[in-house]
Amino acid sequence: MILYLTLISFFGLAISLLVKFIYGVSFLPVLGFTALAIVLVILVDGLTATVCRLLPAKCADHTKKFYKVSAKEKKFYEKLKIRKWKDYIPEIGHFTGFRKNKIVDPKSVEYLDRFLLEICYGELGHFYSIFLGFAILGMFFITPLWWSIAIPVAVINIFFNLPSLFILRYNSYKLVILRKSNLRKQKLAQ
């Protein structure tokens, strides 16, 4: 989380300095507007995640085509060397009461179903946050100065959401395989 806050601060400062030099305006108001844009995009992301989490479970069904991860997509994540960096991305499952950074009961199909449900809710939230982050463009000030701040903040928001989305999809591929294996074992045991 400290890394995320450091990166957000760095990008906020960089955007503020860039806009200050482009428009020749005072630094502190630009920094204030940049901080406002960052807070707004974080609020939009939080609201998006909350709304997605309130959807019925059938909207987050891992068997739907939207959530299917192909072997080709999994290879893409492996080319990104996702295993090396995925543990550095903050996991905030404690807000929903279900942590997704460790599989607690890998042999339980019911547990894996809940895990996949939470992954799908997370995918929805991050997917829509990528696009809804641009909602800040229409907030407060529709001026070139505001847009010069809001557009980079919204674009950076994409790059803050993509890693989490990639991790969730990468993990869901493995969990679906584990779930199928557990179901086979249960049938054989009967």
Image: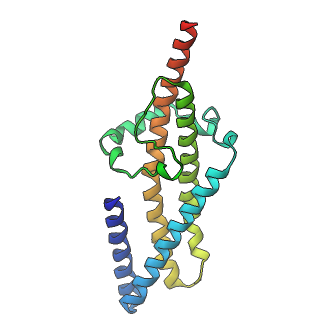
On the picture, is 117 further left or further right than 39?
right
In this rendering, the count of numbered labels is 0
Can you give x and y, in whole percent of width and height, for residue 179 in the image? 52, 24
Can you give x and y, in whole percent of width and height, for residue 77 in the image? 40, 39
Query: Vertically, is 168 above or below 103?
Result: below
Q: Nearer the viewer, residue 37 or 146?
A: 37
Can you give x and y, in whole percent of width and height, for residue 55 in the image? 68, 49
Residue depicted at x 42% and y 38%: 76
Can you give x and y, in whole percent of width and height, for residue 65 in the image? 63, 35
Query: Vertically, is 119 above or below 174?
Result: below
Q: Quadrant of the C terminus?
A: top right
The furthest residue to the front: 97
Q: Quadrant of residue 103?
A: top left
Query: Vertically, is 53 above or below 137?
Result: above
Q: Quadrant of residue 102?
A: top left
Q: Nearer the viewer, residue 158 or 95?
A: 95
Q: Quadrant of residue 66?
A: top right
Q: Quadrant of the N terminus?
A: bottom left
Coloured how? rainbow
On the picture, is 115 further left or further right than 63?
left
